Amino acid sequence: MFIKLLALFLLVPIIELYVMVQIGKVIGLGITILIIFITAFIGAKLTKAQGIQAIKNGRSALMSGKLPHKEVIDGVLIIIAGAVLLTPGFLTDLLGFSLLIPNLRSSYRELLINYFKTRIVIHRSSKNNNKKSKPDETDAQAILEAEIIDD
């Protein structure tokens, strides 16, 4: 995991710099920098607006007695979108704006849910604190099945 993160944090800036230099050669340095600032500004505004909407959606889900799991995941994706939109670069801007498009964000959300469904295993063990009694089946490790229920 450390190697993957290290590669990500090294490769992404190098690729972003390369893309910015290539675009800067075509359209000029000033316009390239201006585009970077404009996308950061627009991204911050959109992130704020959609973040507020995600909070409202979560509250309404709670008020109606539903578990706001989709709204929470949307909120996390919106935070990620804001972070990558504030990062200078064209590729990160593409990712950030794609996370702010509701239809694409729902696709990302489903990918995340499916990813976590395959990775989540719940283990339960019961410890018997009475030293004189023998261990029985309840002391063994049990695997519980969990299911994410979509509305």
Image (spheres, helix red, strand yellow):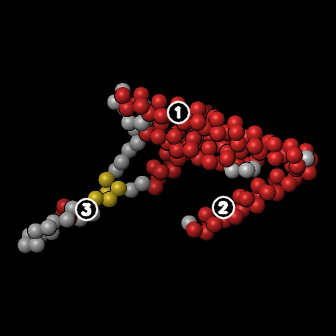
Residue type at the position of mark 2: Leu
Q: Which quarter of the figure is the N terminus placed in?
A: bottom right
Which mark is on residue 125?
Answer: 3
Q: Which residue is mark 1?
A: 52
**How many numbered marks have been drawn onto this rendered protein structure?**
3
Residue type at the position of mark 1: Ile
The structure residue drawn at horizontal position 14% and vertical position 67%, both measured from the top left corner, is 129
Cα–Cα span, label 2 and label 1: 30 Å
Q: Assign a secondary structure to mark 1.
A: helix
- Labels 2 and 1: the sequence-earlier one: 2
Circle nearer the viewer, 2 or 1: 1
Residue type at the position of mark 3: Ser
Q: Assign a secondary structure to mark 2.
A: helix
Relative to 95, 126 lies left or right: left
- Residue 88 x, y percent position in the rendering: 73, 50
Relative to 124, 85 lies left or right: right
Q: Assign a secondary structure to mark 3.
A: loop
Neighbor class of circle 1 (other Cα within 10 Å; few <14, some 14-19, many 20+) is few
Q: Which residue is mark 2?
A: 8
**In the picture, residue 107 is in which quadrant?**
top right
- Residue 83 x, y percent position in the rendering: 62, 48
Circle nearer the viewer, 3 or 2: 2
Neighbor class of circle 2 (other Cα within 10 Å; few <14, some 14-19, many 20+) is few
**In the picture, residue 94 is in which quadrant?**
top right
Question: Is residue 44 shown above or below 121?
Answer: above
Relative to 123, 32 lies left or right: right
